[in-house]
Image (cartoon, coloured by chain):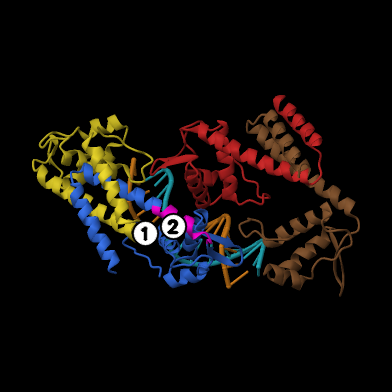
Chain colours: A blue, B yellow, C brown, D red, E orange, F cyan
DNA sequence: GTGGTCTAGACCACG
DNA sequence: GTGGTCTAGACCACC
């Protein structure tokens, strides 16, 4: 469910944060469920525990998880907030891309056609 | 016309490359026109000449500019190619953002509405 | 009457100690009354009995409770001492906060106004 | 100007964050001024550079500083925002302490007297 | 067993 | 030179 892409420009811990946030927001990790322990995930992915620790700390800071010392890290109960936050980010990112595309001379028609194709594909999946 | 955002996560030379490419593709820098010299731009922006040098080298490698020894760097004559390359990149970037937005549960309708708003705004400018 | 906040940075046993001390000092737990057994409180709060045990040990060490082997833990008879100890701690804590606030540039007037509001609210409750 | 208290319960990097934030908010570190480099501060305080790095990362995340790769970390230009943020925190902390003190049976009069003493002392310093 | 912190030492990109 | 990331290994408090 979690994997690292070493060709990705982003650092390992950033990839982990992005991936787990996404899983939690989309419901693949159900609210309240426990994440693998730092050491376990570290050995699964062949990564140093410190790196996992760093990602988990960032996740807690962002409100994606909460941590109980000595017990582990758990997905936040309030997934709705998470979901809406993430959608806000995605939408802002989309708008920026769209803005640049329009300014670069791509027609709105082309962009809309592309969106319709993407949406169709997603529905058929 | 060129400015550096120190809060930007990207490195300085990356910002320079992106900015100059964009200016050349959109015609704000006309084909064949001369870029400021490395030293001049460096002092204008209070940046290490090495950094400018690196950006100019990258621009030449990408075909945005060509260099004549002893004379300076010039915007490529073939702006059309540049323009289409840039549009390809912008479009690919847009598609990626759109894909993520759709997957994240944002409706296609919302995205399309947003695009229409952006396009309208650009036309009125 | 007793609950655990897993988001609290303090450890569980510290929260328990603080909470029970406060209840005893304020009279919500009357002098001489019996605390729930380690096992019972553990199952009520879904917490490891070791953790309760540790809290109870700490409470006895601090003079808040006394333990009779085979019978259980009881709130100390001398609640006055408890009450004054606790007030000392609260006052010291208050002074520290007030000191930092003043040093940080908040006016004494603002602090006093706030205290009056808090006091009024407490009286009306 | 910066020192570590090893008896403090807080971790080293937390102390650094708190201390530097405070210095920046109060103006002892002027806006735009450069912090010591990670390595330099590390050797000054006889602390591992990683620990300093962690504190600096946290400071940037909190908006206290901004970082230019290859050049260093600098105090944010907008110190006013910093100052008001910090006062908000101090005030919230003060209110919590005051609330607990009142609930614990300390009279408002005693608290107010204490504040006046603190304020007087601060003014005479 | 769990997470949290720290040290030591290395490598990278950037200026 | 600068900051950023990662590994390795250790120790702590807590459950």
Front residue (pair B110, A25): B110
Quadrant in which residue F1 is drawn:
top left
- What's the residue at 76%, 42% (across, down)? C124
Find the magenta span and give its range.
Answer: A76-87
- In the displayed structure image, the side of residue A75 where residue B118 appears, left or right: left
Is residue A84 located in the magenta-colored stretch of the structure?
yes
- What's the residue at 44%, 72% (across, down)? A44
- In the displayed structure image, the side of residue C2 where residue D58 appears, left or right: left
Q: Which mark identifies residue B105?
A: 1
Give the total of numbered labels: 2
- In the displayed structure image, the side of residue F8 where residue D112 appears, left or right: right
Chain letter of the residue beneath label 2 in the structure image: A
Is residue A43 located in the magenta-colored stretch of the structure?
no
Up-down: is B119 above or below D125? below
- The outermost residue toward the bottom is C70
Which residue carries the number 2 mark?
Answer: A83
- What's the residue at 55%, 39% (across, down)? D21
Chain letter of the residue beneath label 1 in the structure image: B
Residue A13 x/y as whole percent: 43, 59
Image quadrant where one finds the N terminus of chain B: top left
- The outermost residue toward the right is C77
Whole-angstrom CA distance, mark 1 to mark 2, is 9 Å
The reply to whether discs 1 and 2 touch (Cβ–Cβ < 8 Å) is yes
Residue C69 x/y as whole percent: 87, 73
Q: Which mark identifies residue C24?
A: none
């Amino acid at each position: 469910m979690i994997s690292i892409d070493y060709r990705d420009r982003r650092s390992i811990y950033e990839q982990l944060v992005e991936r787990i946030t996404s899983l939690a927001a989309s419901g693949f990790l159900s609210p309240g469920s426990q994440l693998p322990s730092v050491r376990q995930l570290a050995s699964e992915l062949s990564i140093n525990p410190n790196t996992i620790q760093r990602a988990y700390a960032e996740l807690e800071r962002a409100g994606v998880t909460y941590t109980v010392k000595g017990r582990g890290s758990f997905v936040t109960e309030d997934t709705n907030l998470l979901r809406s936050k993430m959608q806000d980010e995605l939408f802002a990112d989309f708008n920026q891309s769209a803005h640049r595309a329009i300014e670069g001379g791509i027609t709105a028609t082309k962009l809309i056609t592309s969106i319709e194709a993407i949406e169709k594909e997603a529905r058929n999946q």
